[in-house]
Amino acid sequence: MPGHYGDTEMPKKSEMPKKSSGGKMSDKQKSDLKKHMDRHKDLKDLTPSQLKSHRMKMMSRMRKGMSIKEAHSDIMK
């Protein structure tokens, strides 16, 4: 292989910056989400895989700053 291909080194995996999905959830957001998911479990309106999918979608939107109500309505569009 010619020498000019190896001129730049790729950073090691441990040196690369970590990606984040927006921010961490506050304790209030976590408790609100738990209550929301408990309601869905009690209603038995979703299968276990649908519950997990719904929870993941809710979490991603809540990390962006949406409330439970906003996140839920955004998912149901």
Image (tube, rainbow, N blue to C red):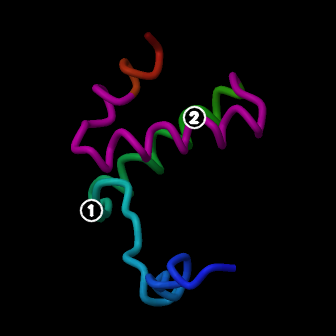
Which residue position holds label 1?
Answer: 26
Which residue is at a point 37% across and 62% down the rendered structure image? 20
Write the start and end of the magenta stretch as one range. 45-71
Which of the image's four quarters has the C terminus?
Answer: top left
Q: Distance between the residues labelled 1 and 2?
A: 19 Å
Who is closer to the viewer here, 44 or 48? Answer: 48
Q: Is residue 29 above or below residue 56?
A: below
> Is 63 on the left or on the right of 51, as rendered?
left
Who is closer to the viewer here, 28 or 77? Answer: 77
Which residue position holds label 2?
Answer: 54
Which residue is at a point 42% across and 80% down the rendered structure image? 16
Specify the amino acid type for callout 2. His
> Is 46 on the left or on the right of 75, as rendered?
right
Which residue is at a point 77% across and 31% down the rendered structure image? 47
Who is closer to the viewer here, 61 or 7? Answer: 7
Quick one: SS at disc 1? Answer: loop
Residue 65 sits inside the magenta stretch: yes
